[in-house]
Image (cartoon, rainbow, N blue to C red):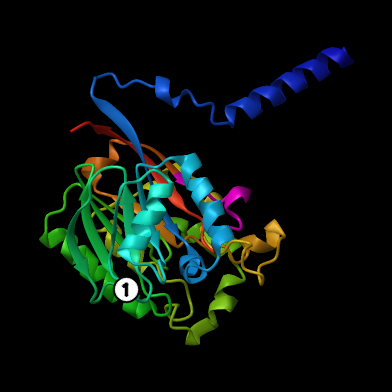
Amino acid sequence: MKKSLLFWMLAMLVCMNVAGQNTGDEKYQRHWQAGHEKIRIISYNIFNGFDYKKDADRRDRLVDWVVKQDPEVLALQELCGFTEGDLLKLAQRWGHSYAAIVKENGYPVGITSKKPIEVVNRLLENCGHGLLHVKTYGYDFLVTHLNPSSTEKRRAEAKNIAKYIEDNKLEKCLLMGDLNSHSPFDADGMERESTSLLMKYGGKASANLLDGDFDYSVISTFLSVPLIDVCRKFTEVNERTTFPTPVLMYLSRNKNVQKLVGERLDYIFVSPSLFKNVVDGFIYNGPENDFLSDHYPVGIDLCVKNK
């Protein structure tokens, strides 16, 4: 009887292990109608551009991770010290032949793709560290990085970006990046678990809080466009942390302590008309991303019709 029980326990462990692995069978997936493909889109804040391109080890490890994920489109924030040529050269290492950057100073955002990129607009005013609007794969991609130090400034930036989407009638768009803001969908979890975060922000005097409490109005501005917050649809509230990672020395390695200061700052939003084509949403906050940046990346899989 004991041997039988042990056998079934081992069998279950093997099945669980196989289920959690990437088996490589994606190439056998089929859409009910011919001419479709599934594309992966990832957004990643890369922490001061690998220390202004000086940290080759972290850069190479992040490149290896991107190659493993094989995204069709990759949005990046904090491309510090990068030119557009630098970004293209880096993108070629993970199989992308096209790249665009919003600016070449400060904290730029950028994007790389397997397919051609058409730059529609580069907005530098009232959009945090910039808003890059490009077209690739037939969709409008908006990449941004909102102000990290003032919720009042973030609210103004969010309203400006929302107005840009509405004025340009971007009905098939994706908005992504480090928004430095908290979602109302995470409120219950944050109020319950992130008990040390309010103290970290500094209480009522903090410009990052709203009268001493978390401010959910920035993300609410995007939700009211309306845009759909993809990752929250596919992850539990206690699994949504995107910042900070253990690469920051001040952070305890104890997971229970980490929860007390964990927060979701990174997002991918899509237009409602696109959400029906979303297959998956990911927050890559596992051990393999612990020491690649101070942020964890987020991603989605989208089923699209070939042009």
Instruction: Out of 290 and 48, give the one closest to the viewer.
Output: 48
Q: Is residue 128 above or below residue 24?
A: below
262 lies left or right of 158: right
Kindly identify the residue that appears in the image at 23 percent across and 66 percent down.
161
Report which residue position mark 1 lands on: 128
In x, y percent, where is residue 81? 41, 71
In x, y percent, where is residue 189? 53, 57
Q: Alpha-carbon neighbours of circle 1 within 10 Å: few (<14), some, or many (≥20)? A: many
Tag 1: residue type?
Gly
In x, y percent, where is residue 176? 34, 56
Kindly identify the residue that appears in the image at 58 percent across and 77 percent down.
200
In x, y percent, where is residue 152? 34, 79
Instruction: Out of 290 and 159, give the one closest to the viewer.
Output: 290
What quarter of the picture does the N terminus occupy?
Answer: top right
What quarter of the picture does the C terminus occupy?
Answer: top left
Kindly identify the residue that appears in the image at 20 percent across and 50 percent down.
135
Disc 1 element? loop
Find the magenta span and give its range.
Answer: 282-291
Kindly identify the residue that appears in the image at 24 percent across and 54 percent down.
226
* Image quadrant assignment for residue 219: bottom left
83 in magenta: no
Specify whether residue 176 is in view.
no
Q: Is residue 124 above or below residue 12?
A: below
208 lies left or right of 255: left
36 lies left or right of 54: left
Specify whether residue 82 is in view.
yes
